Amino acid sequence: MPRYFFDLSSNGETFPDPEGSELPNLESAEDEAAKTLLEIAREKLPDGTYREASIQVRDEAGNQLVQIVCRCRLNTPQKCRLNLPQYSAAAGLPERAPGDRRR
């Protein structure tokens, strides 16, 4: 099974993944990176008015395969909460937030 590495970058700092994870394919690695980045965004709201975080997925040879980026910007001086969709692993798509009437 191939090993994928998930390097986190946040506000100019990079945190390389020294161990990686064995996953069946690149699609599984992309899903894992997206879920992880959403969890990070939910837990750590922006400090100040802007925050950017990304995860770069690379293979065992060090080749960057995909990058997933999350940008957060606060538009009000009050602390606000990100309303991120819940990730549906079964469907592979975000679920609607309560009260979201978009179709």
Image (tube, rainbow, N blue to C red):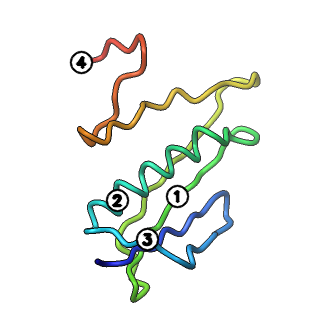
Q: Quadrant of the N terminus?
A: bottom left
Of pointers 1 and 4, the one earlier in the residue sequence: 1
Mark nearest the camera among 3 and 1 is: 3
User: Can you say whether 15 is above or below 48 in the image?
Assistant: below
Alpha-carbon span between mark 4 and mark 2: 25 Å
Q: Amino acid at mark 4?
A: Arg
**Label at residue 103:** 4
Mark nearest the camera among 2 and 1 is: 2
Alpha-carbon span between mark 2 and mark 1: 12 Å
* Residue 61 point in image, percent of width and height: 39, 89
Of pointers 3 and 2, the one earlier in the residue sequence: 3
Residue identifier under label 2? 30
Q: Quadrant of the C terminus?
A: top left
Q: Are marks 4 and 3 in contact (CB under 8 Å)?
A: no
Point 50% across, 62% down: residue: 55
Mark nearest the camera among 4 and 3 is: 3
Point 37% across, 72% down: residue: 22
Image quadrant assignment for residue 91: top left
Instruction: Tell me the element at label 3.
Output: strand
**Label at residue 54:** 1
**Label at residue 80:** none
Alpha-carbon span between mark 3 and mark 1: 18 Å
Q: Are marks 3 and 1 in contact (CB under 8 Å)?
A: no
Of pointers 2 and 1, the one earlier in the residue sequence: 2
Residue identifier under label 3? 21
Alpha-carbon span between mark 3 and mark 2: 12 Å
